[in-house]
Image (spheres, helix red, strand yellow):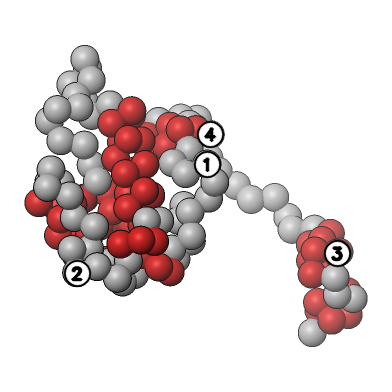
């Protein structure tokens, strides 16, 4: 994900940067490559420091209306966003688009919690004493 982008802005990104009819796979759906290309364009726009102060908001003449509206609405927010080096990651996109689903009919049940192990893990991870974790 993009640090600084929450649920609302994430949905707005998906709406604005979804490939148009020009990028349709043989199966009739939008291709994964099309999404990745659009997300690369989002990153390039958001990280183009040279145009952060411009009134044009980095709008290009061939941008679709949804992208134009998004860029204008978010031109000041993008300075707060931080992209991972590998964004957009094809494996992450594939995992969201084609999730592994457990189709087991077995009823789900939780195992008992090993409280001592949880406290030990928290103490180790947070570099605190077990007593402090238990407070």
Residue under numbered circle 2: 55
Q: Residue at x 15, y 35 (%)?
A: 20
Q: Residue at x 29, y 40 (%)?
A: 38
Query: Between disc 3 and disc 1, whose residue precedes?
Result: 1
Q: Secondary structure at mark 2?
A: loop
Mark 2 surroundings: few (<14), some (14-19) or many (≥20) residues within 10 A? few
Residue under numbered circle 1: 86
Which residue reaches farthest bottom?
A: 135
Residue under numbered circle 4: 106
Q: Residue at x 43, y 69 (%)?
A: 80
Residue under numbered circle 3: 124
- Where does the C terminus fall, quadrant-wise? bottom right
Disc 2 versus disc 4: distance between alpha carbons? 58 Å
Q: Secondary structure at mark 1?
A: loop
Q: Position of residue 73 (x, y in %)?
A: 21, 67
Q: Position of residue 121 (x, y in %)?
A: 82, 61
On screen, residue 1 above or below 49: above
Nearer to us of marks 2 and 4 is 2
Nearer to us of marks 4 and 1 is 1
């Amino acid at each position: 994900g993009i640090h600084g982008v929450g649920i609302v802005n994430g949905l707005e990104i998906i709406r604005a940067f979804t490939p148009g009819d020009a990028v349709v796979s043989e199966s009739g759906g939008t291709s994964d490559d099309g999404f990745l290309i659009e997300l690369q364009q989002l990153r390039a726009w958001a990280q183009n420091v040279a145009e952060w102060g411009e009134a044009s908001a980095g709008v290009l003449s061939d941008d679709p209306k949804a992208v134009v509206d998004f860029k204008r609405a978010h031109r000041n927010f993008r300075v707060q966003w931080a992209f991972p080096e590998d964004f957009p990651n094809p494996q992450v996109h594939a995992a969201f688009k084609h999730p592994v689903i457990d189709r087991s009919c077995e009823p789900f049940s939780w195992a008992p919690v090993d409280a001592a192990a949880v406290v030990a893990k928290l103490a180790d991870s947070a570099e605190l004493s077990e007593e402090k974790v238990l407070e």
